[in-house]
Amino acid sequence: MDGTAPRLDLNAAALAALCDEVRDLILRHHAGLPDAFVGQSEGGAALAEAMREPEAAAGPTPAPELLAVVEQALSVTYNTASGGYLAYVPGGGLPAAAVGDLLASALNRYVGVWRAAPGLVELEQNVIRRFAEIVGYRTGADQTAHGILTSGGSLANFSAVVTAREALLGRDIRHGVLYTSAEAHHSVQKAAQLAGIFEDRVRIVPPGADLRLDPVALEHVVAEDRAQGLVPFCTVAQAGSTNTGVVDDLDALADVCAAHRMWFHVDAAYGGFFAMTQRGRAALRGLSRADSVTLDPHKGLFLPYGTGCLLVKEDGPLQRAHDVAAAYMPAMADGAEHIDFCAISPELSRRARGLPVWLALRLHGLDAFRAALDEKMDLARRLHHGIVARPWLETVTPPTLSLLSFQVKAEDPDAATERLLQTVNSYGRVFLTGTRIASHGYVGRACVLHLRTTARHIDMCLADLDRAHAELA
Ligand SMILES: Cc1ncc(COP(=O)(O)O)c(C=O)c1O
């Protein structure tokens, strides 16, 4: 060794050249996005095989070659960045936040403890403040709500259940029972499992006819469990279910939780940001009564994948559930004004997750997000009117927010609906997915939440439903 080991840092010219290459790729990619082919899942195994690298590359590879590999990888994907993506719950991909992600990583400061980057922590706290206002938590001088940005809704639900468990059960968790509905996202069951609340302590409360968690049935199951010596400690409600978009009666469920001293968590990963709109606020009445709320900015705020959020109404429980000290750590923040994110979350090192959110919110302004969410609600209603106008289709759940479900009227509605969806998706202009619910079997669903979805995509969806129906007749 002569002491001249290869340098991993890029000089200014090399960094600028790499940024230029990447910028060109992004601009090329973005140019066709609104109408890009929406899903290509054929050929995945062949692509994976072609991309496998059996040996390590010990030497350098020029950037253009590597970026060509990235473009090759894009050749088989669900195109989650296309305006025609109405599947699952669309993630966004807001360009401003993508640039914020690059900025956060390039600056690479440490935000796990307040002392290490108080300014960046405060930017993230500003984001948390805005989110707390959106769900209706107390704000200003007497604000007690706080929260964390997570990697997504699943991790937010996990920290919520751990916080509820710690607050209500303490160290003896053996008899604790958690309640939710069949409409709950599977991350709720997973969160309970990871928190040590196993299947036999998770109750799926029978739904009402409208698929919402039935408060009367909840009271009944809770009473039964208490009589058995169990300890009901948490109810998880849905504010926009992934399955069919239903919003539980949050006010009524908050009453039950208050009466039985249970933690009330609302999974608003899909639906929570609609509280920014007038119609959404009305549909989500009672949200501010939750002890904790999961939000997913990478859904309802159109951010790129990787940002969720847990808000907790009162100061204290989140920290009691997560705080562990270590001698090698820097001094923790002093006073209630400043927060060490590592003391209220499972994570220590992470990127400055708040920076891209803050950048996007400030660059566009909150009103732009409010208007976009209102537009998505209008578009879902446009699609719903189209479904109602087609006598061969039947609405299963109308859009409370921006998600609806439907079924084909046929002798075998399950098979007919599945075939219809497959045929529509094969045209590649819009992408729909289905689900199975106990009362109806297989249903089609459309979730209008992509920032690039416009009336044109909705009309394309209806035209493709007609075309597929005619072809299958
Ligand atoms: C209602 C709901 N909760 C939780 C999640 C899980 O969120 P994530 O995928 O961000 O972990 C989802 C994801 O679609 C969801 O729709």
Image (spheres, rainbow, N blue to C red):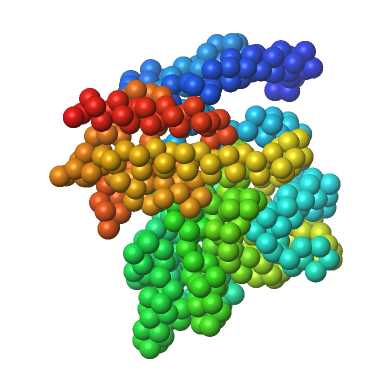
* 74 horizontally vs 320: left or right: left
Vertical order, 225 against 321 (above or below): below
x then y, percent, for residue 418: 26, 38
Q: Residue drawn 54% across and 77% down?
A: 255
Comparing 153 with 116, the one in front is: 153
Q: Residue drawn 41% across and 77% down?
A: 216
Q: Report the number of numbered marks.
A: 0
Q: Residue drawn 73% across and 18% down?
A: 15
x then y, percent, for residue 239: 51, 58
Comparing 472 with 155, the one in front is: 472
Comparing 92 with 249, the one in front is: 249
Give residue 241's quadrant in the image. Answer: bottom left
Location of the C terminus (image quadrant)? top left
Vertical order, 108 against 283 (above or below): above
* 12 horizontally vs 368: left or right: right
* 371 horizontally vs 448: left or right: right
- Confirm whether residue 343 shows in the render: no
x then y, percent, for residue 198: 39, 67
* 205 horizontally vs 275: left or right: left
x then y, percent, for residue 100: 71, 34
Location of the N terminus (image quadrant)? top right
Comparing 444 with 311, the one in front is: 444
Vertical order, 343 against 78 (above or below): below
Q: Residue drawn 27% across and 57% down?
A: 438
